[in-house]
Amino acid sequence: MTADATLLRPLPRRRRSALFMPASNPRAVEKARQLPCDVVILDLEDAVAPDRKVAARDTAVAALAAGGFGGRELVVRVNAGDTVWAAADLAALAAAPVDAVLLPKVGSVADVATARARIGADGPALWAMIESARGLLALPALADAAEGLGLTALVAGTNDLAIDLSCRPDTARTPLLPALAQIVAGARAGGMAALDGVLNVTDDAERLAAECAQGAMWGFDGKTLIHPAQIATANTAFGPDPETLEWARRVIALFADPATADRGAVAMDGAMVERLHLEQAERIVAMADG
Ligand SMILES: CC(C)(COP(=O)(O)OP(=O)(O)OC[C@H]1O[C@@H](n2cnc3c(N)ncnc32)[C@H](O)[C@@H]1OP(=O)(O)O)[C@@H](O)C(=O)NCCC(=O)NCCSC(=O)C[C@H](O)C(=O)O
Ligand SMILES: [Mg+2]
């Protein structure tokens, strides 16, 4: 790839922190307009009781129309395709001012294709939760179909996944790690973003920091969250640390220097730096700048 071609590639959005909230909770939705999360996810699925589903959908649509979320990316998680609410959820969001619609319990390309048919070819981008064994097995096919279906992000649903796999996660999430790696690989293969699953515990800052660092290490762009108190930790963990940012700025400067600008590979601090690192460095700086 040439340097010019590199510059033509779109930069990804910052998705360090993606806060879920029940769309049926107007207080939480109101609060989200001021919170420092990158993504707001209004939930119509598991956080909403069956008898409040229709009201929650109406509240979500009204909240989107009212706006006031600033630069935060706006996402609505609808009910699963095999539920009585799915078709009406998607119809209500087809022309809504929403950045993406998150589909839970995706187990096949057909699940996404059905949602795309219901919401329309010109409807919002679709995101898919991978939270079952079938979802994991569908990842290569989902990566291949992503562009055609407007599928732009994969989200790990670690609660449902642990139940479906019948595994017993420890605090280090040991039995889930192969699945998390598969989700990141599927997302990258399909040109999609990858978001890590939630931590249900809201009063253990050390555990949250460790889980965010783990998600960042495994390649996720950010983490889905359930409480405002989790946002700052995710923003720090998924943003570049000062050392990485400094490295990136120096790589950019190196390739801008007339003495080395026409080189493919240069030595810096006793290590090889190539043009692929220049692209990486430009992305790191762009993400840090927001
Ligand atoms: C987990 C909670 C039920 C806790 O609620 P609560 O005890 O009321 O929290 P606090 O009293 O500490 O709240 C303090 C203030 O913060 C606001 N708040 C709380 N949570 C949120 C939120 N998520 N977004 C916005 N604002 C929030 C409260 O309103 C308080 O405000 P104030 O009145 O001004 O003091 C609750 O946090 C909650 O409902 N969280 C989200 C639950 C959710 O959306 N779950 C679904 C997504 S996760 C999932 O489904 C997993 C996945 O599918 C998988 O399989 O893994
Ligand atoms: Mg789930």
Image (tube, grey):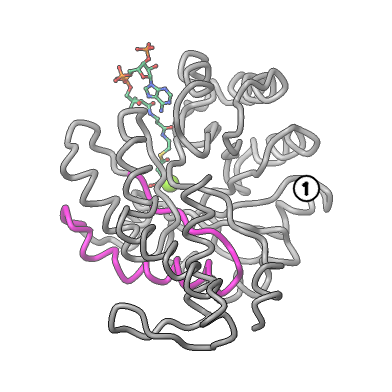
- Tell me residue 1's x, y (percent): 64, 83
Identify the residue at horizontal 64%, vertical 44% (top origin): 101
Q: Residue at x 83, y 53 (%)?
A: 121
Confirm whether the magenta stretch covers residue 95.
no
Q: Residue 65: image x %, image y %?
A: 72, 22
The picture places residue 141, in percent across and down from the top left corner, at 60, 75
Q: Quadrant of residue 161?
A: bottom left
The residue identified by callout 1 is: 118
First to last magenta residue range = 169-198
Depth order, front residue of 125/70 = 70
The amino acid beneath tag 1 is Arg
Residue 178 belongs to the span the image colors magenta = yes
The yes-or-no answer for disc 1 within 8 Å of ligand 2 is no
Total marks shown come to 1
Q: Residue furthest front?
A: 259
Across and down, in percent, residue 177 comes to: 29, 66
- Choose between 52 and 201: the one closer to the eye: 201
